[in-house]
Amino acid sequence: MRDDSLEKVALPSYAPGVQTRANTSRGKLSRGLRVVLAGTLSLVALQSLGLSTQLWREETITVPLRAQEWLRTCELLDVPPGPPPDFHDRALSDRFVDGTMPTFIMNATIWTGGDNGMEVLKGDLILDGGLISRIWPGGADSHVLDRYNNLAFIDAQGKWVSPGIVDLHSHMGVDSSPSLKGGSDTNSRKGPVLPWLRALDGLNTRDDAMMLSISGGLTTVLVLPGSANAIGGQGAVIKLRHTADRAPTGMLLESPYEKNTTIYDPSKYFRYRQMKHACGENPDRVYSGTRMDTAWAFRQAYDHARQLKEKQDAFCSKARKGQWDGLGEYPEDLQWEALVDVLRGRVKVQTHCYETVDLDDLVRITNEFKFSIAAFHHAHETYLVPDTLKSAYGKPPGVALFANHARYKRESYRGSEFAPRVLADNGLQVVMKSDHPVLNSRHLLYEAQQAHYYGLPHNLALAAVTSTPATIMGQNHRIGYVKEGYDADIVLWDSHPLALGATPQQVWIDGIPQLDAPFVVSKPASLQDVPPTPNFDKEMKETLKYDGLPPLEPKPSLKRTVVFTNVSSVHLRDAHGVKAVASASANSALSHIVVVRDGKVACVDVHSPRACRAHLDDDTEHIDLSSGAIAPGLTSAGSALGVQEIDQEMSTQDGYVFDPLTGSVPAIAGGSGVLMRAADGLQFGTRDALLAYRSGVTAGIVAPLTRGFVSGLNTMFSTGARHKLEEGAVVQPVGAVHVALHPGKSASVSTQVAALRNLLLGDTTGEMGKAFAKVKMGKLPLVVEVSSADIIASVIGLKADAEEALGNPIRVTLFGATEAHLLAKELAAANIGVVLAPVRPFPSSWEERRILPGPPLSEQSSLSLLLAHGVKVGMGTTDKADARNARFDVAWASLESGGKISALDAFSLATSNVEELLGVASDGEGDLVATAGGDLLSFSSKVVAVISPRRGVVDIM
């Protein structure tokens, strides 16, 4: 909505009334005018109307009462968007808080964002007045600080300083955490076109996610309405620092004109606004329409805005000439003024759009109505049609992407990890965004790290969460860069920002430190360098060749014997877990040779090249790992991997089981005693499973999907298998029985616990009875999906009661267990294991609100605290697209622990521990993964082969 500040604009005044004017014989306005009825006109006022004082032949005209106001309005229509040219002359930020101490940061490595992200300075900088007041490449002279009486000193010790992270797409504050009824103001259901709505009017400043996101380096967020509408309303650009007024308005990056005119004169420069558009499935679903309906809604809305704009322009053209007769009132409509301003180039259009057909629709509409799109968001198919984007009106839109989050609906099925690189190669602006709370924006930087891993140049990867989103928002004059005169929103990192697990040591917003006593983990010095990345040229070309769906099926080596050379370390599985066989750290001068025959490791040459010669023959393939490694394949658990292809397409998945606690189960299925088996609904060859396999996650454990109390029996399967009947495809048909205890279901928590008590202590028939008979004997683990510490306490008590009544121990594992850290001591004493999922917690719901966030907000994480108390812990995930990232999750946990979690411990989290906790018996025959350029836990390595003893093959990637 335009700011109500017109009365502050000084324009010539005149008295309205009935006036006469003289015309020339040609019918044009003459140089004469006189007042007939009331009021007088000054010479200046007459000239402002395009008239003079020389009389010729008289004609009566009427000057409207609001003429002066309307002329001011007309003048404001020509005010350009963006900052005034003297913006950086300011000595004080408009967001400066009185009493803020200046901060001097010395010995920093500064990524400024300049020179297309290539500029890096080593030196000092000072934050003062809410601004980056001064930067000294090479270091400041001591005398320049003499004028400061009170100064905070920070020695960066050579570590990296970057601009604060900027999120171009978030619903923080309108889709609040924890999620509660009535707490979502993301979407309106009042119609497909609603440009008059504003996210600011629904912004909840009490959102628990705000402080968490600051702890990840986030400083500025574009809060957008949701995607339920073709035009959903206006976004709000906020800083996450809580302000003294504790109100949404105080969080705005730029205060409204009526609150602060020290920076912007609204009669000269107009601040950019943000508008949310959406196309494709989302608005279609809400209004039961089609893509054709949505496209028409856009065209109809913009045609209305165009007509209003043309009426305004015609009015102003006549008003400026003094042609008031019959002109009527200035044409305006508060509901449509923002969309008219889109046509005037004063609103940044942020568009939710996935598929080629929708991208093409919107591009054609921009050319029809002559407006620009700032960025396409989500945009999973943009990398396939860069030329379509380049044909948009005005200039090519930027593209705001996820790094890995895809295949959750049809629109995202062709999403690719190589999209950021492909788009950048085509000269398009790339942004990594969170869509918070879809992804936890605390870890938005992780999206940039993954984009860099898969080929986006380092300068553009870091720019993708700083300077590029700032530019696309029209705010690159004050945020997104470390430059003198810019807002003092910066982050001091414990490692290079693109290094896995990079964590803020401190975050400043408006020059104010945001972290109280941050906990800083000691990390290897090598993490201060730009991470080297693997070469994915072949995979990227294959992706484009196959229109986003390249073949992912593994290709077995045609040789019986495969020899891996230049191996830096070897970790193998046995019946007891993971063991180190050879390590470069033990003797870095040696590289090793590993010989694999018929899918099994036949020899590891630790001492000399001759040791393995007896295992070689003519039928041999050699693979150089270039200081790579061989390690156990990881196991994914917790997501729908293996029983689901596309989340939102029921035809592509096993579906959800009947729940005997909340509804009747058909007798033909077994009635209330039925217990479903995940093995019966397994799907092989899904893209998420194959991507996981190619990323070193060679097995998955999945339980039947449930929305209720009973889930069923889990199973373990090979992610690389072609079908269920293939040798080794189903590793173990049944592992454990799963139930879920959550508040908010149709049955109360106490009812759910009572049902579980009856299953453990009462008599149950059918498959349910058989399974729980094994649970009671301690032969089959009981896996309880639970989050709340209060419900976990009930589970601990129930286990104790059952063991006393049964006279023997039973095996219980908690899954999810967000609040388990609150009962770490009690869980250890009860011998209850925990599979954390996700391992980096987020307060999504009320039962998950008491998280232990880990560094820099707390010394311990849930993972490290549970391990410290002796609880057996496994690592799980809740999103099947994230299964492929298990290796990074494990490595991140190890880095975050400050050395307390060793490589062996880290491997165990996603192998032997999670398998044991979920009822899978290890035979020591698990798959192995060969990586080139580093070990499996390295951000620089690439999986090149999978060694499968069960299937007797080596798959080459």
Image (cartoon, rainbow, N blue to C red):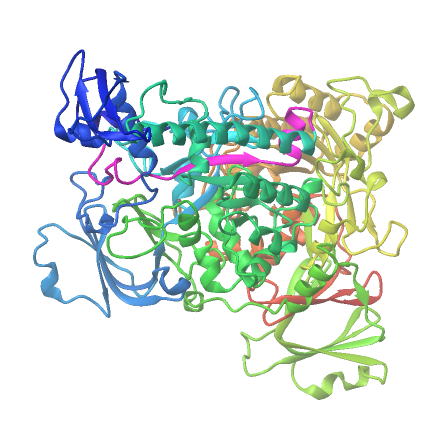
Q: Residue at x 22, y 33 (%)?
A: 260
Quarter occupied by the C terminus:
bottom right
Q: Position of residue 459 (x, y in %)?
A: 45, 63
Q: Is residue 532 visible?
A: yes
Give left or right: position of 784 versus 45: right
Q: Is residue 264 magenta?
A: yes
Q: Position of residue 395 (x, y in %)?
A: 49, 51
> Going by the picture, which residue comes out furthest to the front?
25
Q: Is residue 79 above or below residue 449?
A: above
685 or 456, nearer to the observer: 456
Magenta residues (range):
260-289
Give left or right: position of 821 versus 253: right
Q: Position of residue 488 (x, y in %)?
A: 27, 49
> Going by the picture, which residue comes out furthest to the bottom?
610
- Magenta segment's dominant SS is loop
Q: Is residue 519 magenta?
A: no
Q: Position of residue 345 (x, y in %)?
A: 42, 41
Q: Is residue 612 above or below residue 472?
A: below
Quarter occupied by the N terminus:
top left
Q: Is residue 177 visible?
A: no
Q: Residue at x 40, y 44 (%)?
A: 858
